[in-house]
Image (spheres, rainbow, N blue to C red):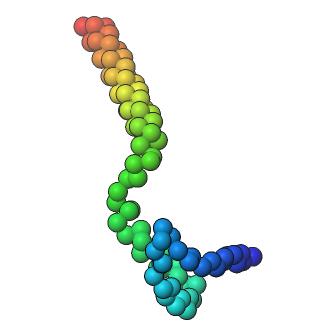
Amino acid sequence: MTQDATEIEVEVVEIDGVAPAAPQARAEEAPQSRGDWQDWRQWQGRVTRLDNRWWPLWVFLGIIALALALTVGVVIGVIVLIFRILQGFVRLIQG
């Protein structure tokens, strides 16, 4: 299933008393496989930068990650504490 883009051609006669520049002849469209590659080139610098519109999501995910890290730390601390208490009881029993 392919969807053809609907194109509307208009002619701008004048904007604020100034005539627009003459339109340039449209180049032949490249084959579809090459067009996909051209679309990816505009993402070259964007991949390494975070978009400012998504900062609430990153803050929310950061809070969740921090909560999970603190939970894991507390669980490990409880396990170590229980192990030391049991180790103390074993030493007490053995004398």
Q: Is residue 15 above or below residue 36?
A: above
Residue shown at the point (41%, 33%) measured from the top left? 63
Q: How many marks?
A: 0
The front one of 4 and 90 is 4
Tell me residue 86's x, y (percent). 35, 15
Taking the spot 37% from the left edge, 27% from the top edge, the residue there is 70
Q: Quadrant of the C terminus?
A: top left
Q: 60 or 26: which is nearer to us?
A: 26
Which one is in front, 24 or 46?
A: 24
Q: Where is residue 91? Give x, y as percent.
A: 27, 12
Q: Please indicate, yes or no, whether residue 72 appears anywhere in the rendered image.
A: no
In the picture as drawn, the residue positioned furthest to the front comes out as: 17
Q: Is residue 40 left or right of residue 74?
A: right
> Which residue occupies 56% across, 76% down?
12
- Give the answer, above or below, for where 88 lies relative to 1: above
Closer to the camera, 50 or 6? 6
Considering only vertical position in the picture, is 35 above or below 89? below
x, y percentage for residue 54? 45, 46
Residue at the image point whose x is 42% and y is 75% from the top: 41
Whether residue 10 can be seen here: yes
**Which quarter of the image is occupied by the N terminus?**
bottom right
Residue found at the far right of this picture: 1
